[in-house]
Image (cartoon, coloured by chain):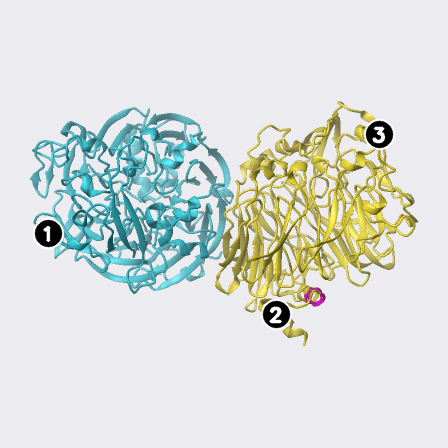
Chain colours: A cyan, B yellow
Amino acid sequence: MRKGLGRLCLVVAGSLLLPSAGSANDMLMKMSQDAKQWAMPTGNYANHRYSTLDQINAGNVGKLQVAWTFSTGVLRGHEGGPLIIGSTMYVHTPFPNKVFALDLDNNGRILWKYEPKQDPDTIPVMCCDTVNRGVAYGDGKIILHQADTTVVALDAKTGKVVWSAKNGDPKTGSTGTSAPMVVKDKVIIGISGGEFGVRGSVTAYSLKDGKLVWRGYSMGPDSDILVDPQKTTFMGKPVGKDSGTNTWEGDQWKIGGGATWGWYSYDPELNLIYYGSGNPSTWNPKQRPGDNRWSMTVWARDPDTGMAKWVYQMTPHDEWDFDGINEMILADIDVKGQKRKALVHFDRNGFGYTLDRVTGELLVAEKFDPVVNWATEVDMKTGRPQVVSKYSTEQNGEDVNSTGICPAALGTKDQQPAAFSPKTGLFYVPTNHVCMDYEPFRVSYTAGQPYVGATLSMYPPKGDKHMGNFIAWDAGTGKIVWSKEELFSVWSGALATAGDVVFYGTLEGYLKAVSAKDGKELYNFKTPSGIIGNVTTYEHGGKQYIAVLSGIGGWAGIGLAAGLTDPQAGLGAVGGYAALSNYTDLGGQLTVFKLPD
Amino acid sequence: MRKGLGRLCLVVAGSLLLPSAGSANDMLMKMSQDAKQWAMPTGNYANHRYSTLDQINAGNVGKLQVAWTFSTGVLRGHEGGPLIIGSTMYVHTPFPNKVFALDLDNNGRILWKYEPKQDPDTIPVMCCDTVNRGVAYGDGKIILHQADTTVVALDAKTGKVVWSAKNGDPKTGSTGTSAPMVVKDKVIIGISGGEFGVRGSVTAYSLKDGKLVWRGYSMGPDSDILVDPQKTTFMGKPVGKDSGTNTWEGDQWKIGGGATWGWYSYDPELNLIYYGSGNPSTWNPKQRPGDNRWSMTVWARDPDTGMAKWVYQMTPHDEWDFDGINEMILADIDVKGQKRKALVHFDRNGFGYTLDRVTGELLVAEKFDPVVNWATEVDMKTGRPQVVSKYSTEQNGEDVNSTGICPAALGTKDQQPAAFSPKTGLFYVPTNHVCMDYEPFRVSYTAGQPYVGATLSMYPPKGDKHMGNFIAWDAGTGKIVWSKEELFSVWSGALATAGDVVFYGTLEGYLKAVSAKDGKELYNFKTPSGIIGNVTTYEHGGKQYIAVLSGIGGWAGIGLAAGLTDPQAGLGAVGGYAALSNYTDLGGQLTVFKLPD
């Protein structure tokens, strides 16, 4: 019965009889358990990015070779990765957000192509390259979140538009970069624009027709943020009335940031979705006194109603742009000798958090790069990081350059998702090993204009030449198990497999395979351009394949991507990653690997 | 002594002591004989595109795999191929004509990058995509012919500009697309713009400082075209006085076309360079009565003075845009039982010509695709093709659609260069198998504006579904030895090797290896984008590599490259090659292949 599921799903997806929304969800669950496919951007609802496929394994991965390749015809940063549904691969691109359906039976022949018409004026509103993190599949539809925030459902078979919805307005600073997640009969979608003073929100649309079902903001009145003052908890206690406004001065919450452009997770048993909200706007902390709740927060919401069950704010009153949007990985693991329904999150602020995902209880918060210096530790009672005064851009004040802060604004990890192997029990984390100088300045808000208010420089930690590490993490103890240096930040998403191999890409363009056990490099291949995409695996015709998008860009690669040369441009990334131009140039290609026949 | 040459050259090239121009030529000759390198766009002066390397051979080519890849960061058509000088690979791009020096010791790490600043208004003046066919090497310099006709010499070691010269003016319709050729102390360079009424010319610049040494036009007074009325011959007879003006009406020769954007060959023993001139302007034959000499002509010139020794006009008074610029391959072969110093040329008009390259005597002229119907044969006495009235767009007249003409305007072969294997004695020819409807109309000349005067449609020959063949040709007898069908035109340059393998690329993006003996397909690999580049081979660290640029475009791919959808746009190619969009999208990548370690 189990064995035939992949095929069954494919047939149904391709039939004219659309299954009901409920069954679409069941089907998605089953499809995500079918290792032959890659049905969600995150691999599965738990965001594991793990595959049970083991044809490619630690013993033979060194023999990997390129099977076929595909150019998307778009340059700039290619984040995310393809979906594989049956014998079709769905590939997306950065702006203009093309979607290709490729025939796996025919070396990637193009079955259909969708290219939306979008106002190019959307591009300047995208803070950190024109990226898009991928499409979602559900109920025979491919869901695309365009840069201009249009959400469009395409018939997976034909590419024809089934419905479309408007998730925001680039004219007021909001853009679409995140991958949607289909849960039951809904599509869950976030929004970008924390550098333009948007008020972040998560929206659920009807998978069937695109109608808005609920929207939960990151800050604002209780009815906007969908919390119950008594039932919604933070550190085990009710959040109380007006929690989304009473840590803001006046109306500042209306332009409060807390964007929601990261990855989403879902626990079907608990019926909760999880995600993080981003930095408060502006980056000048002096301008927005208070804890700025609920920016920088882990959210657990009911996907049916949007109501929050619990929240956990990691970085109250952010002073460094330690945007909290990184993915939540759901895993049942031993924490200090006890089996816990855990949520593991590697935050931009450099702490690896383990929480109880049922209650939001804070279990572990440890630095996942020893270089992190802005806080000494997280107080496990209050959940608050203990800020080191000399690295406090608030205390140092406006127009003062706070130097030597680690990590840099793009964090010890950014959007590049980690992987979890249930087999080893370890988390495999692509990281940034970068510090910064940060000088806040007063800025005034104009809708649709940058609302940043800080000048940054980025560089490797003192004494180091490398700017990245790929690490294995024990989330039960909060310890690094092994760490592998990389010349630049590892801006690519990891993939762990039952073959005891972990894959990731580098900004120079290498796809690498390392031993899940000790991080030893087993294989590398220079793809056409820097990799900021997420590694994916699938099986087709009895063979396991590895696929990854190349295309330098994203925040780290913005200098190359946007042709910027001023070192402080790109919010400091241009100077920090200038040496990238010695290794790679713009691209936009899919490379598919296999073992020799 | 011979064995160490490659290394010796490298050291000298990289030293501060620039060798004298004379020795640069000797060095180039020797470098082109060192199979480890690929020192000229054409492989060698004879334009053989043949390598004596045989590590990769018919027995093992099926095991070929991708070694590394490189994205140029430029989309649109990538014609030409890289040079390999010592351990450095030089890669060029279409507009904006970047040049990369890549380190072969380090998976293509970028040693330097040159990107000229060019007026984007040059792009609309390029008739058939923004292509560039490659850079030349000589005397420690890399010579680039930019789209805007600037010729620039770069220090091969640093990428710094040594000198630059202006070869034309895009404002009057001339652009640069062709690869330069270094001969002795000169750089020989052609010009594009036959669709804009330029008067084609070939220019020799001083390799040392870029000073213009001589310029020979395709039409005009004897002193312009550098012919001696008595000594320069056509079909064994002196061309006579005013041969470049007396087959034109009035001053029409001044906007007469005869562009020179193809490949150049050189016979050091005879001290002659060879190339073809293009179509007369306009494409409406009624507007320019006469033979329109010396458009459509094979030229043999003295590289020191530019003086023509002989000419041979293949298509007098062109009525189909059978542009004569295709490469001249120099080979000493048996022709009808006699060893001849031959020049072999596969013309757009569908005839494969074999001439005596010493005298210009016409030896063989046979159709290299049986579908060719516009002429029955070439009269071996006069050298004139015998035109079939129903396919004569001149006879049918203006505003009349002449239908079913084979080949189409882009010819049975276009710029995609053939290869010659001295081992098999065969020529390996990438061909177009395409017919057309052609409707000439009256057009007036305005400098810098298109001066085409015909509307075209292109399609496969009646009853056929394929639009290309890759053939092996016996130039001594004028017969096809074997022919392999391809879905689309083979717009990529071929490579023949001592391993009895011939390589070429397809518009869908496949690199293919076939048996030199019988054309049997031994290997194929789907590169990121359609291939219109030329396949190259070299040896590095004891291993043979195969390299090819992908990037759909050129005339055949102009619909995809320029985003055109009107079937008659792109001079008829958009409709003819519309199905290409089912296979590939824009790209710009180098793929390097090797055998498994």
The local crowd at label 2, few if under 14, some if 14 to 19, many if 20 or more residues have their Cα within 10 Å, is: few
Q: Amino acid at mark 3?
A: Ser
The structure residue drawn at horizontal position 47% and vertical position 51%, both measured from the top left corner, is A585
Q: Which comes before the other along the chain, label 2 or label 3?
A: 2
Residue at 49% over, 45% down = A70
Q: Relative to the observer, which residue lies in front, B113 or A168?
A: B113
Residue B105: image location, x then y, percent: 50, 65
Can residue A358 be seen here? The reply is yes
Q: CA distance from mark 3 to mark 1?
A: 93 Å
Which residue was labeled with disc 1?
A379
B231 sits to left or right of B551: right
Left or right side of A253 for A263: right
Q: Which residue is mark 3?
A: B389
- Give above or below for A252 relative to B34: above
Callout 3: chain: B
In the image, the segment drawn in magenta is B22-27
Q: What percent of the width, then of the height, locates residue A597?
A: 49, 56
Q: Specify the subunit that label 2 lies on.
A: B
Disc 2 to disc 3, C-alpha distance: 62 Å
- Which secondary structure lies at badge 1? loop
Q: Which residue is mark 2?
A: B17
Left or right of residue A73, residue A203 in this image: left
Number of dots carrying numbers: 3
On residue B553, which mark appears? Answer: none
